[in-house]
Amino acid sequence: MLRRCPQADPHLSHPRVVVLLALAHVYQRDRRATFRQVADVAGVNLSTVHTHLTALRRLGMVEWTDGEAGTLRPTHRVVAAG
């Protein structure tokens, strides 16, 4: 008997996943990340990245120190799931 897949989290839209993967790529490569680097890798503009990362921050998936460049990183929730 086939089971249905569980519903995807509505907060993790495809664009947010793309931004999260871009962050993971930049952070793994450089051990630091900026919003601009994530925007460049994701291929979207900076304001779009900011919107998605702010939502992901509220979900506990990313964190950064306000006002300090290069402190953007995925949280342990994302690293453990990957």
Image (tube, rainbow, N blue to C red):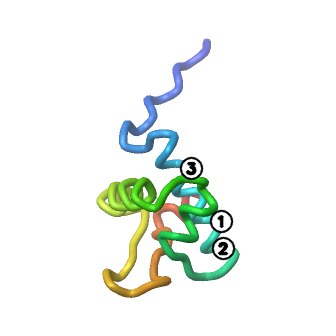
Q: Is residue 54 left or right of residue 30?
A: left
Q: Is residue 28 above or below residue 23?
A: below
The N terminus, quarter of image: top right
State the SS at label 2.
Answer: helix
What residue appears at the point 63 percent right and 70 percent down from the top-left corner?
Answer: 26
11 vs 37: above or below: above
Res 2 → quadrant: top right
**Vertical placement of 3 versus 81: above or below?**
above
Residue wearing tag 3: 18
Residues marked 2 and 1 touching at CB (< 8 Å): yes
Q: Which residue is mark 2?
A: 28
Q: Quadrant of the C terminus?
A: bottom right
For disc 1, the marked residue is 25
In this view, 38 is above or below 81 = below
Percent from the top left, x then y, of residue 37? Answer: 57, 70
Whole-Å distance between the Cαs marked 2 and 1?
5 Å
